[in-house]
Image: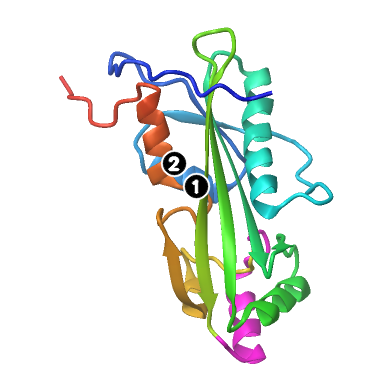
């Protein structure tokens, strides 16, 4: 069943949006805080396993929508952000390593190679009652990893311990030193929440960013 996109709401600065970030990620929380909008955080608690035969882009998009929907069912009448990211090398999905050994194997496989990150975003607006208005977008980021020796990769992992990051590198931290090139239309997508796409969606739902203070 198609998901309705909804019509734009008129902008209003009379009240802050009832905004929820449906994520347990501290990285997404930090990114969203940059917008200066009041929000709260709720954990979706969904199964994030990829389905057999599902493309990486489809996995990321499905999970972003499922995260937003899960929160929407628990907190109706709110504006909810869901996001998910899937990294791929030669079309195969790369998950969160979870520990040092897995992370090292990931970096060894990716060195000197290009990895594609699909960052899917869903904005779920249930404020008007009835069928929610839903917007979605997938942002692709191309990342070239430097061809570094095992000793450097191992040393990096022991310093930053990015075991909760798909691709085993924190580009917002020291992990930038093992990357050679990043190509994306949205510079924050790689960290987990594409703010250019998100601000466009929020504007469509009437959220004002530069309201005059009186």
Which sits in the foreground, 1 or 74?
Answer: 1
- On the image, the x and y values in percent for residue 94 come to 71, 63
Tell which circle, 1 or 2, labels the residue nearer the N-terminal end: 2
Q: Is residue 27 magenta?
A: no
Residue 100's quadrant in the figure?
bottom right
The answer to whether residue 127 is above or below residue 85 is above
Give the x, y percent position of residue 114.
57, 74
| Residue under the point 38% across and 45% down | 196
Q: Is residue 168 visible?
A: yes
Q: Is residue 150 magenta?
A: yes
Q: Secondary structure at mark 2?
A: helix
Image quadrant occupied by the N terminus: top right
Cα–Cα span, label 1 and label 2: 8 Å
For the image, the number of numbered tags is: 2
Would you name the residue on which mark 2 appears? 32
In the displayed structure, 127 sits above or below 188; it is above
Res 43 visible: no
Q: CB under 8 Å between callouts 1 and 2?
A: yes
Q: Which residues are magenta?
A: 147-165
* Residue at point 52%, 79% (across, down): 178
In the picture of the structure, the residue carrying the numbered disc 1 is: 193
């Amino acid at each position: 069943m198609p998901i309705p996109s909804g019509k734009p709401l008129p902008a209003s600065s009379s009240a802050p949006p009832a905004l929820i970030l449906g994520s347990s990620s501290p990285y997404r929380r930090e990114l969203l805080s940059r917008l200066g909008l009041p929000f709260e955080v709720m954990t979706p608690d969904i199964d994030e396993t990829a389905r057999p035969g599902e493309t990486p882009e489809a996995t990321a998009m499905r999970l972003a929508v499922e995260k937003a929907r899960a929160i929407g069912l628990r907190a109706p009448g709110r504006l909810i952000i869901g996001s998910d990211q899937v990294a791929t090398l030669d079309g195969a999905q790369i998950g969160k390593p979870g520990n040092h050994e897995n992370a090292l194997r990931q970096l060894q496989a990716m060195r000197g190679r290009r990895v594609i990150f699909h960052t899917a975003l869903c904005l779920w607006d249930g404020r008007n009652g009835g069928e929610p208005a839903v917007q979605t977008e997938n942002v692709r980021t191309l990342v070239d990893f430097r061809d570094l020796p095992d000793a450097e990769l191992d040393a990096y992992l022991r310093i930053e311990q990015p075991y909760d990051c798909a691709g085993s590198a924190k580009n917002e931290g020291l992990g930038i030193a093992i990357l050679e090139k990043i190509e994306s239309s949205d510079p924050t997508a790689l960290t987990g929440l594409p703010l250019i796409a998100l601000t466009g969606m929020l504007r469509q739902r009437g959220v004002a960013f530069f309201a005059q203070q009186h």
